[in-house]
Image (cartoon, grey):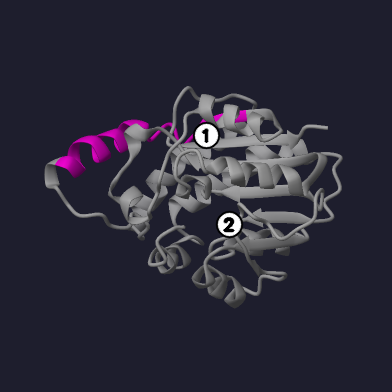
Amino acid sequence: MMNPAEFANIAAAERDLWWYRGMLRILSAVLQPYLSGRTLRRVLEAGCGTGYYSSLMQRQGWPMYPVDLSSEGLRYARELGVERLAQADIAALPFRDAAFDLAISLDVLVHFPPGEETRALAELARVVHPGGLVVLRVSALDLLRSRHSQFALERQRFTRKRLIRQAGKAGIRVLRCTYANALLLPVALAKFRIWEPLTGQPPASGVKPVSPWLDHLLYIPLWLESKWIGAGLGFAAGQSLVLIGERAI
């Protein structure tokens, strides 16, 4: 489970902060081609946190079914007017087999101890119908663990190869898997591997507003990546991974 103290930080920042805006743009660019011709009758968000993503999709007409283990996250989701909320462990989902056309889980698997994410992946595969989509986003590369990782109670990070392998074991046929938030990788490495060890600061949330000019500057690389990834191209490394798969028939 994520550190409950982080929900307030996320709720205050996720509408406007460069990272959230940019990563949502990238997610949309990756996912959109696979939605063509599909009817979405029921969409699961497994680990909805504050419910912000579900609220956005709900406004676009998606029939969202958001769940989260944390009552704190669900409190924020209720304030946003998110419908059909449920408190549940994504490793033991309270839904019948093949109940959904699409299951999305964003930055949740990293909070499972290494190896235990297999239970959650198996559940995501179970609750989508054969041929239904499973969408994952996770933090990438152990080298990029930070003070924020420790504060948020992140238990693991993934490589592209391991995420694909674990999804396959769960019965998810991978359609696409790409690194993202790649252009800022040199900045992240300098901050996490040089600056933070030198200053010796304690774990702390990295989710906080920055000055408008810096927010705009940091958003530009993610906007560029959304165009690159949306054109079907990818990156050899990055701070996040996005995977699109479908339940094997």
Label at residue 147: none
Q: Which residue is mark 1?
A: 225
Residue 187 on the magenta span:
yes
| Nearer-the-camera pick, 177 or 211 | 177
Q: Is residue 173 above or below residue 199?
A: above
Label at residue 47: 2
Tag 1: residue type? Glu
Give the side of residue 144 with respect to residue 65, left or right: left
Quarter that holds the C terminus: top right
Give the residue drawn at x 86%, y 40%. Answer: 37
Residue 62 appears in the figure: yes
Residue 27 appears in the figure: no
Mark 1 closeness class: few <14, some 14–19, many ≥20 residues within 10 Å: many
- Name the image quarter holding residue 184: top left
Residue 40 drawn at (x, y percent): 82, 51
In front of the other: label 2 or label 1? Answer: 2
Residue 77 drawn at (x, y percent): 59, 70
